[in-house]
Amino acid sequence: MLQSGSTSGASRRLEWVARGENMDSLEMGTNTWPVERRRYSRIFLGVPVRVHFAGIPQSLTLELADVSVEGSYFRTSGPKPRRGQWVAYGFVTADLLVCAARGRVVRVDDAGFALQLEGTNSAFQTFVTDISAPFRRAA
């Protein structure tokens, strides 16, 4: 049940839709989503990869949730690195290419952490280019 006292733009629009009212004159074009600041599309993967945190001798297998040319996001309920810490990871593709990347942690949240990539090998660059090709727009 919708409450009429809600104040967010999205809630108001939902109330008007639920009542069957015309929304043409109401805040159309108002975006309540956060502004996307990424220059490159994220490709959602959800695959296990080996991850190494700087200063910790043993590696972990974590879920690489998404990747782009400039960054990666890992999901984990286990240990997380601290912001600014170096992290490296790698995986082997179906074509037996060994992909490797490293970067600094730029965000840590309850679900995982994000890296800004600062180094990748050519196999990683080829992998990301190949999987992101369907998402690129023609100029």
Image (cartoon, rainbow, N blue to C red):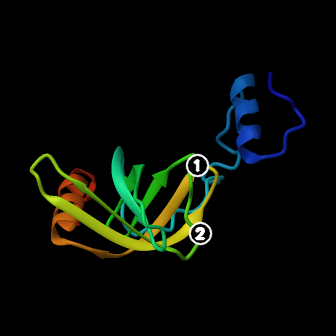
**As drawn, 44 above or below 121:** above
Name the kind of residue labelled 1 in the image. Ala
In the rendered structure, the answer to whether residue 94 lies left or right of residue 116 reads left
Mark closer to the chain start, 2 or 1? 2
Q: Quadrant of the C terminus?
A: bottom left
Using the image, tell me which numbered label, if any, was put on residue 82.
2
Say which quarter of the image contains residue 133.
bottom left
Q: Residue at x 57, y 63 (%)?
A: 35
Say which quarter of the image contains residue 84.
bottom right
Count neighbours of disc 2 (C-alpha within 10 A) and say few if under 14, some if 14 to 19, many if 20 or more. Answer: some
Counting from the top left corner in percent of width and height, residue 25 is at: 69, 45
Q: Quadrant of the N terminus?
A: top right
Is disc 1 placed on a helix, strand or loop?
Answer: loop
Which of these two is toward me, 111 or 126? 111
Q: Residue at x 61, y 53 (%)?
A: 33
Residue at the far right: name it. 5
Counting from the top left corner in percent of width and height, residue 118 is at: 36, 78
Counting from the top left corner in percent of width and height, residue 78 is at: 56, 49
Name the kind of residue labelled 2 in the image. Arg
Which of these two is toward me, 133 or 92? 92
* Tag 2 and tag 1, C-beta contact below 8 Å: no
Q: Residue at x 19, y 58 (%)?
A: 127
Q: What residue did someone put label 1 on?
A: 111
Q: Residue at x 17, y 56 (%)?
A: 130
In the rendered structure, the answer to whether residue 101 lies left or right of residue 126 reads right
**As drawn, 114 above or below 131:** below
Is disc 2 placed on a helix, strand or loop?
Answer: loop
